[in-house]
Image (spheres, rainbow, N blue to C red):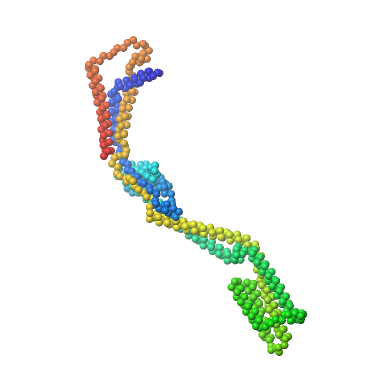
Amino acid sequence: MNMHDLLDQLSGYFSDIRSRPWHVILTAWCVACIGWIGMLNIPDRYQAAARVYVDSQSLLRPLLSGITVQPNINEQVTIMANTLISRPNLEKVARMTDMDLLAKTPAQMERVIADLNKNLTLKSTGYGDLYTIAYENRNPTLARKVVQALLTIFVENGLGNNRKDITSSQKFIEEQLKDYEIKLETAENDLKNFKIKNAGLMPGEMGQDYFSKISDMQDQMRQTEMELHEAENRRDSYKRQLSGEDPTLLTDAISSSNTPEIDARIESLKKNLDTLRLKYTDQYPDIVATKNLINELEASKKKESKSRRPLSGSGPSTLYQQLNVSLVEATAQAEALKGKLDAYHSQYAQLRGQANRIPEVESEYAQLTRNYDIYKKNYETLLSRGESAKLSGEMQNKTDIVDFKVIDPPRVPLTPSFPNRPLLASIILLGALVCGLALAFLIGQLKPLVRSKKSIEAITDFPLLGIITLIENAQSRTLKHRSRIFQGISLGGLFVVYAGIMTKYLMSAAQ
């Protein structure tokens, strides 16, 4: 099929439709009337809307940065907006607008909730901080009440959730502070009791560790042994002089010692004892040795006082007494040094016996110290966070970190948002015309008319010899003219009705 044949076919279709104008007009009238009547019976639905702006750019936020808790306000508002149309909030809206009073059964209440969920919308603009709340219902007053209720919930949740989060955080931190305070006190007591129990074994105690104490003890033992050896030598020398074994030393050993000298010696030892007691306990070896020496000197003094008798001034009696006093002093000093050495040996043996406990004590002490440091650090951190949360709570209570500004409050709508009757009337008119044309085209296909020479030749397969022209008379032309007038009036009436409908609703919308 070439282009000429296609144009002939389309021309034939157009001729079929044009030859049946009443089919087109009557069908268009019927379809349009049915459509417009149905449009008028569609119940009106009114949409109430409100716009709210969420301002989270508070001046206090940069000023208190690093001091208070700074929540992500934009994220919280986004989450809150996404969860606003939830069942608990819808039930709350139903109670606030008395819609729950219309529901007598649970099934009716479910339908109320479903209607709210279906017709409520919350949209965010491209800026992200401007939200539109809209609701559609047959009752315009109810639509406004629903939007107002949801707007109230939106604002209350935005302010209340932040305060609730801060309060919950404060309560949690306070509970943790109490727990860590108990743990810290327990760790302190454990550490104190451990130090008391293991006194002398603690690492770094009194500026020395265990091995330093061992070394010092060995040095003191060697020094005491040397002093003891010297004291024993002096004692033995005095014994030999008194027994006459070494008379040549008798003259050299003579000293001017007498009872006043013993008293002076005792007084000096007592002063030394007082000095030692300021630094050490009574069990300290030097204190024990000094006490023994004082006791020996006092016993010697008493013995000499009892045995003293009047002397004739001869030399041998005085020398004997002086040697005897020196022997007593040397003996007492040797005994004191021996006791001191024994005490050092005992302490040294005790330290050596504690060698196996040193690593265990150090390990346990490190564990206790580590626990104490951890508890203390966490306690101080929680204390700082608690103050920060407290300040944040006061800031939330006394200032508005998030400010909700209602740009467009909800109002009672005067015109319905659905259906859009001007648009629907236009669609019905267009559809009616299309239906009329389609019906005329369908009839033309069912009852085709021969319109051209080619059509006859195609149907009969015979060549066309000639054409007889129909000559219309005056009466036929008059009828045809009248028919066209009626057709125009009928089609014009359809558009007049359409224009009336459009004028009515457009004027209502303008008001």
**214 in relation to 308, above or below:** above
**165 in relation to 136, above or below:** below
Q: Position of residue 297 (x, y in %)?
A: 66, 80
* Residue displayed at 54% across by 59% down: 373
The N terminus is located in which quarter? top left
* Residue displayed at 66% across by 67% down: 217
Task: Give residue 42's quadrant in the image.
Answer: top left
Report the front residue among 292 and 29.
Answer: 292
**56 in relation to 26, above or below:** below
Residue 110 appearing in the image: no
**226 in relation to 476, above or below:** below
Q: Position of residue 467 (x, y in %)?
A: 31, 12
* Residue displayed at 35% across by 21% down: 10
Judged left or right of residue 191, residue 86 is left
* Residue displayed at 60% across by 75% down: 274
Report the front residue among 54 and 199.
Answer: 54
Judged left or right of residue 9, residue 489 is left
Residue 473 appearing in the image: yes
Q: Position of residue 276 (x, y in %)?
A: 61, 73
The C terminus is located in which quarter? top left
Number of numbered discs: 0
Q: Position of residue 71 (x, y in %)?
A: 43, 51
Task: Give residue 290's quadrant in the image.
Answer: bottom right
Q: Which residue appears farthest toward the front when viewing the image?
A: 252
